[in-house]
Image (cartoon, grey):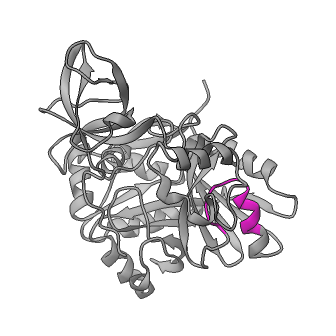
Amino acid sequence: MTELARTPLHGLHVELGAKMVSFAGYDMPVQYPMGVLKEHLHTRAAAGLFDVSHMGQVILSGPSWEAVALAFEALVPMDVLGLEDGRQRYGLFTNDAGGIEDDLMFARRGDDLFVVVNAACKAEDVARMRAGLPDEIAVTELTDRALIALQGPKAAAVIEDQDARAAEMRFMDVADLALCGHAVWASRSGYTGEDGFEISVAADEAETLVRSLLTHHGVAPIGLGARDSLRLEAGLCLYGHDIDAMTGPVEAGLTWSVQKIRRAGGARAGGFPGADVVLEAFASGVARKRVGLRPEGRAPMREGVQLFDAQEGGAQIGAVTSGGFGPTVESPVAMGYVTTKHAEVGTRIWGEVRGKRLAVDVAALPFVPANFKR
């Protein structure tokens, strides 16, 4: 048995009464005494504070911004070179088969690129960057920084109370801020569908920062349980579930993340792993698509539930990849893949739960409208 890693906030989680679980090799809080349901609703109504320090933080640096950006474009199908200083984008590492090896966020900080990757893929992603980038690009994994997220409609007021410059930030802006006396790197982004900030701070300053933020009215600690139900309502993918190495950007509904300049006919088309497969999917379509799902009744349809085109007999047309109860919408919600023929919103299909097929309708994503500051 390998001992679980701990984030710089581990002691605080235990002090706050968190129920700790193993997640991506870390001992992480799944919920606090408030409970998952109330934590979810609190984030939608006020401000939830999440520890996401298990995720990987990496700085790419080189002789110039152009050198760094073009080198990184050899690994992702995104427009990196066109990213303005102080802006962030969602990205994907692809493989030679056009599948997704991980999803990530990348931000321009001057001539450097700040990359945040998923915890479960962290080691592989760092190795991928070190192997796939030229020697002139330094890949520095930041093991001395924590990462927290403050999410919800009251998050902005809390951050702006500490640094008025935060009020000028819009969705996907990044900036250096001073919060509770600590110098931090902040992005106006998150994984809940709500307005909010993700904040990188020195590891030895993380606990004092979090303790200070928790004194603000409306701020409460939130665990992984509510983080998952929040992102599901927001229609956001979880790597290893809704997207994986066998899933391409087009079938995953992530076409918006691939800018036109990297598609066929674009000035820097292709040039990333699996480009021929991904660009062919844009041109010719795909056999299946990720969709939202609204089960009829109150019974959730969870990951692995098989989907069929008829209540009796018929053919299997897909499967659920994420599912549970949506506290905001007060009903079960799910995401999954179905054949393109059945992907139109409003299509009635059936999910098999404990040997019984129950009705489920293909639904538009997200289930809860995004509240980002545009």
Horizontal relation, residue 364 to residue 79: left or right: left
Task: Give the position of the C terminus as an image quadrant.
Answer: bottom left
Task: Give the position of the N terminus as an image quadrant.
Answer: top right
Please provide percent x and percent y for residue 100: 58, 43
- Quadrant position of residue 171: bottom left
Q: Which residues are magenta?
A: 68-80
Residue found 62% across the figure and 28% down from its top: 2
- Quadrant position of residue 193: bottom left
Residue 39's place in the image compared with 121, above or below, is: below
The total of numbered circles placed on residues is: 0
Please provide percent x and percent y for residue 156: 34, 75
Horizontal relation, residue 197 to residue 142: left or right: left
Report whether residue 35 is seen: no
Residue found 47% across the figure and 59% down from its top: 256
Residue found 38% across the figure and 64% down from its top: 150
Horizontal relation, residue 251 to residue 358: left or right: right
Q: Report the residue that reaches farthest toward the right.
A: 135
Viewer-closest of 159 and 266:
266
Viewer-closest of 77 and 342:
342
Residue 200's place in the image compared with 160, above or below, is: above
Q: Report the residue that reaches farthest toward the left.
A: 297
Residue found 24% across the figure and 19% down from its top: 353
